[in-house]
Image (cartoon, coloured by chain):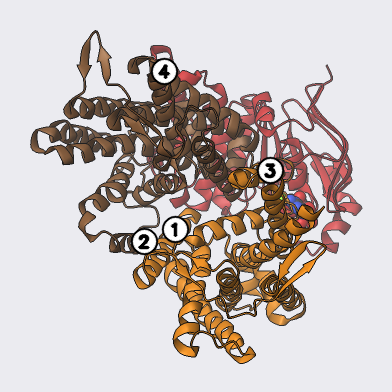
Chain colours: A brown, B orange, C red
Amino acid sequence: MRQSYKIAIVFLIVMGFFPLFSNSSWLAVGTTFLIYSVVAFSQDIILGRAGAFQMGHALFFGLGAYATAILNVHFGVPIIYTFIPAILIPLIMAIVLAGPIIHLKGDYLLVATIGFNIIFIQVIQNDVFGLTGGPNGIFGIDVVRIFGVEFMSQTAIYYMSFILLTLTLLIMRNLDASKYGRAMFYINKDDIAAQSMGINVRYYKLYAFALGSAIAGAAGSMFAIQYSAVSPEAFNVVQSIMFFTIVLVGGSASLPGVLIGTFVMFVLPEIFREFATARYLVFGLAMILTMILRPRGIWPVKFGNIPNYLKKDTK
Amino acid sequence: MDIFLQQLINGLTVGSLYALVALGYTMVYGVMKLINFAHGDLVALSAFAGLTIYVEIFGEGKNSLFVVLSVFVITALIIAFVGVLLERLAYRPLRTAPRLSAVVSALGASLVIQNSIMLIWGPNMKIFPSNLFPSTIWTLHGVVFTFTQVMIMGISALLMVGLYIFINKTKMGTAIRATAIDQDAAKLMGINVNRVIMTIFIIGSALGAVAGLFIGINYRGITFDMGWMYGLNAFVAAIMGGIGNIPGAMLGGILLGLFNAMISGYISSEWAETFTFVLLVVILIFRPTGILGETIAEKV
Amino acid sequence: MSDYLLEIKDVSKFFHGLVAIDDLSMKVKKGQIYGIIGPNGAGKTTLFNCITGLYTPEKGEIIWEGKKINGIAPYKIAELGILRTFQTIRLFSEMSVAENIMSGRHIKSNQKWYNGIIHTPSMKKDEKKNWLKVGELMDFFELSKYATTPAGDLSYGLQRRIEMARALAAEPKLLILDEPAAGLNENETIKLAQTIRKVRDQGVTILMIEHDMDMVMSLCEYITVINFGAKISEGEPSFVQDDPVVIEAYIGSDEDE
Ligand SMILES: Nc1ncnc2c1ncn2[C@@H]1O[C@H](COP(=O)(O)OP(=O)(O)OP(=O)(O)O)[C@@H](O)[C@H]1O
Ligand SMILES: [Mg+2]
């Protein structure tokens, strides 16, 4: 995994220079790629690390986006301040929603989380509180202003997303080298052994849900800023399935894997836009083929992330 | 009371369809522990294939018993074949892989089937001919029910009874049950697991095909992506009943159909899905493995 | 407080009406090496699962340091100082040997919830302390050269050692071993016996199931014999060995050890 940090750093350097070489439409794709990568990592915390089959993650991404949109457009809260509720609301909702079902076994959890996502979409589509704008969503989200300076250019938004991804990668690194991150892996690999070692499975699964959803919420807020609008279809189950697939196609719990997954599942279809309809057919075939050839993902995780002073006798 | 009876008929109709589709999910899950996400798309494919077979081979308007039976049998055979192909190509290579890789493969297969339908039949809604079944309508105390509805309920019931007998009374049925309990042990007992899996894909797909045709005949409008909606509902039904459990899928299907119909009748159809999933979560909170699902203490 | 670390009082456990443990009682003293033997399917592992909280007995009491612990979640039981190995090895097989052993340090680590996100100096100290402990255990169990190897890639004997190291990493008061010698060759078994003695001498009480009679008889200080879920004999090795009831049970069940 040491190697994977180096790759992540190279990736960040490349992405840091990307705006210098790209036109505005590719800059937009690049920005969304950064944001989706953040969501993919947050999905990875829950699915790839803690091993909870979360197939409704777009719900938390959407909660963050709608929190920013509603607070800014309906209540005039400056974007900068909406960032905090955009993180806290998904975090709290994750605990409230996942709490009662966290004990469900694999596929039962998967269906329940799909259910939450679908309910969320119905709630915003039917405009229950008169705040979500129904199927059209919410338009006219303000730009970010800090000390009177407006960050409204595409490049500015790109770099804000870039910072968000950098922070997310830092969190992933810290998580990997902590009791909390390891506990998730233990639960994932063998929950009975994990419990017998004193690990409270429920607590760490909820921790993963809370952390993953908070990060997804931050990404949602950024997404709302990028498009200065939000609408339901960006957060429906199809999107959730995409995030779920990104992690598995790329490689669960693998930093390069998740980045590759996001690239393959999001950027490639953008590149092959001209092939309009046929592309999803090819896409489906590619998903099947990838899993057959690389069942653990394109770039599987490598364990053995231990301090150097323990490696003295190895080789 | 009229609303109630009317929704009871409607609910039983939809519920029968859900149950037929749910059986496909549950049988595959029982043996392979895999959610076959492409199953709903096979149902949609069946509606389109049936439409083409009916119109192109027999000609619209012909509705003798022979024609109707032929359409059903040919379509079911085609879909069963596609189901077997699906298993061979997308699932068999992943039998020993981590569980989630097969899930992704299933999602991929779903995309493939859905988009193939779209490329072949186009992205717009197709209308199923109205004359495959007689358009007889009965009215009883203000409650309306159609010939088609009666057929759906009757045939579904017959198929389910047939399946129940097959699973419980035949040698192949026993092999299926044994494989569902312990695949390795079944292999050691000389059961040909590949044949068992092929059989469940044939049966599950054929039942889904019948459901797909019924959907076309009853609701008329068919779209390339409708498999997702029917598939999801049927899958939820299977989970409610306890996935892997055959009577559970039947019970879950009927229950969900009735529940949906009552919600639409008394509250609002706008919130149908929300109610569906609230019901699901409530059931799972109290019965984590569904209504008829058993909780087995894992042997340590 | 009684003299006993662990007391099992009239415990019964059923599976679908089938009796797996039948009114079983036993007492383990602090510092003892305590053996449990009995034919296959006697209910030995089930008893361990009851003690460690994986199963809840339908009847009876399990008393740990004077307090009733049945019905308590497995992770809390581990926190109390009861750690175990498994008959069918349950390692985190894709993870490295060092990471596997580190799981034992979980309950000894005092990291806070925010340390999963932000590292603090005290957290780094905690991290280092725990890894060093893992290093010590790898040295003790001669596993250092496999530190970064996935546990699942190693031989059976090594895996058994990793499981024991993992449990010991939690600094247990009671170490429960379920057939630790199963699958080991003669040399490995002798070494294992020495290791178990050393561990006990460091103050850890040992409760073990074992089919290898030579090992049990030479190592254990007290033995309980179970058949069909019920205790049929108990006492010091010399007594149990010659107890006609025990001989009968073993001959009756064509046990060949
Ligand atoms: N989770 C379970 N569900 C159903 N039956 C079980 C379960 N766990 C154990 N049993 C049954 O309880 C009985 C005792 O099993 P146990 O594993 O405790 O035996 P054991 O003494 O450890 O045998 P061995 O020496 O073979 O390990 C057996 O009949 C077994 O099949
Ligand atoms: Mg045992």
- Give the CA distance from mark 2 to mark 4: 38 Å
Q: Residue at x 55, y 88 (%)?
A: B62
Image location of residue B138, percent across then percent down: 75, 71
Q: Is residue A130 visible?
A: yes
Q: Of tags 3 and 2, which is closer to the observer?
A: 3
Image location of residue A234, percent across then percent down: 39, 41
Residue carrying label 2: A284
**Residues tagged by mark 1 and mark 3 found on one chain of the structure:** yes
- Give the CA distance from mark 4 to mark 3: 37 Å
What is the three-letter code of the residue carrying label 1? Leu
- Image position of C157 (left or right of A170): right
Q: Residues within 10 Å of mark 2 (few under 14, many from 20)?
A: many
- Image position of C108 (left or right of A225): right
- Give the CA distance from mark 4 to mark 1: 35 Å
- Give the CA distance from mark 3 to mark 2: 39 Å
Q: Which mark is residue B229?
A: none
In this view, the residue in front, C177 or A93, is A93
Residue carrying label 4: A84
- Image position of A150 (left or right of B119): left
Image location of residue B268, percent across then percent down: 64, 44
What is the three-letter code of the residue carrying label 4? Ile
Residue carrying label 3: B267
Q: Which mark is residue B107?
A: 1
